[in-house]
């Protein structure tokens, strides 16, 4: 089958954040990084279209049964802002997207919050994507197959016509199981 769509992850594939919000939250609030920690964290902050960063912070605190204090709310907001404000786009990305967009539909599929997702506008790469899917819009967090289905539905194509590029094997494996070709981005 011919490739028609190339789907990129955002973080650690097109650009890099300064630090990790989930790691910072785990360390600061002394939350054990159990097997389900990342999923719980993503579900707590990425699935909703938060009105404010303070609401997002409160949602995280409530999801982990932590004290909802002004200090905790402020710490989460400042940490998230720091990671995104110091995020960098890999230098080769604009040229790559320019070339690929001439021949393929491009999509973005990223587990990220409504506030972090704005980075693609700041980096001026939003114009390359025919679809950008984030959990607060799709209702799914990778590696849930619903994430991949949302892209295919939006771009009116079949999984076998897509290539998914992500830095994690778990997400690549799920995309392969869904029927897409994958590339695990390493460097």
Image: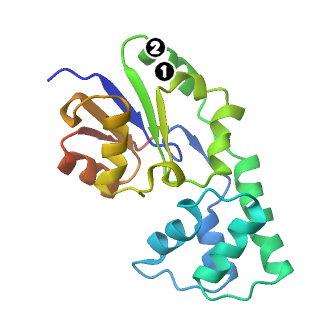
x and y percentages locating residue 53 in the rendered image: 75, 61
Q: Nearer the viewer, residue 175 or 17?
A: 175
Q: Is residue 95 above or below residue 130?
A: above
Q: Is residue 112 left or right of residue 103?
A: right
The residue at 58%/22% (across/down) is: 127
Structure colour scheme:
rainbow
x and y percentages locating residue 120 in the rendered image: 63, 35
**Local SS, label 2:** helix
CA neighbours of label 2 inside 10 A, class few (<14), some (14 to 19), many (20+): few
The residue at 24%/23% (across/down) is: 3
**Local SS, label 1:** helix
Residue at which label 2 appears: 99
Q: Furthest-top residue in view?
A: 102
The numbered mark at residue 96 is 1
Q: Is residue 187 left or right of residue 76?
A: left
Alpha carbons under labels 1 and 2: distance apart: 5 Å
CA neighbours of label 1 inside 10 A, class few (<14), some (14 to 19), many (20+): few
In what quadrant of the picture does the N terminus appear? top left
x and y percentages locating residue 103 in the rendered image: 37, 12
The numbered mark at residue 7 is none
Q: Is residue 85 above or below residue 142?
A: above
């Amino acid at each position: 089958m011919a490739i028609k769509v190339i789907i990129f992850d955002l973080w650690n594939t097109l650009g890099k954040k300064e630090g990790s919000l989930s790691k910072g939250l785990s360390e600061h609030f002394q939350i054990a990084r159990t097997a389900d920690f990342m999923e719980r964290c993503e579900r707590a902050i990425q699935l909703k279209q938060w009105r404010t960063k303070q609401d997002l912070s409160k949602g995280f605190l409530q999801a982990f049964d932590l004290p909802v204090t002004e200090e905790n709310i402020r710490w989460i907001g400042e940490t998230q802002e720091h990671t995104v404000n110091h995020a960098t786009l890999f230098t080769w990305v604009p040229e790559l997207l320019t070339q690929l967009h001439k021949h393929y539909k491009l999509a973005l599929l990223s587990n990220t919050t409504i506030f972090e997702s704005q980075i693609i506008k700041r980096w001026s790469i939003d114009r390359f994507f025919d679809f950008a899917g984030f959990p607060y819009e799709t209702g799914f967090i990778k590696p849930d197959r619903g994430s991949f289905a949302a892209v295919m539905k939006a771009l009116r194509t079949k999984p076998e016509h897509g290539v998914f590029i992500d830095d994690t094997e778990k997400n690549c494996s799920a995309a392969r199981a869904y029927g897409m070709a994958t590339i695990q981005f390493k460097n």
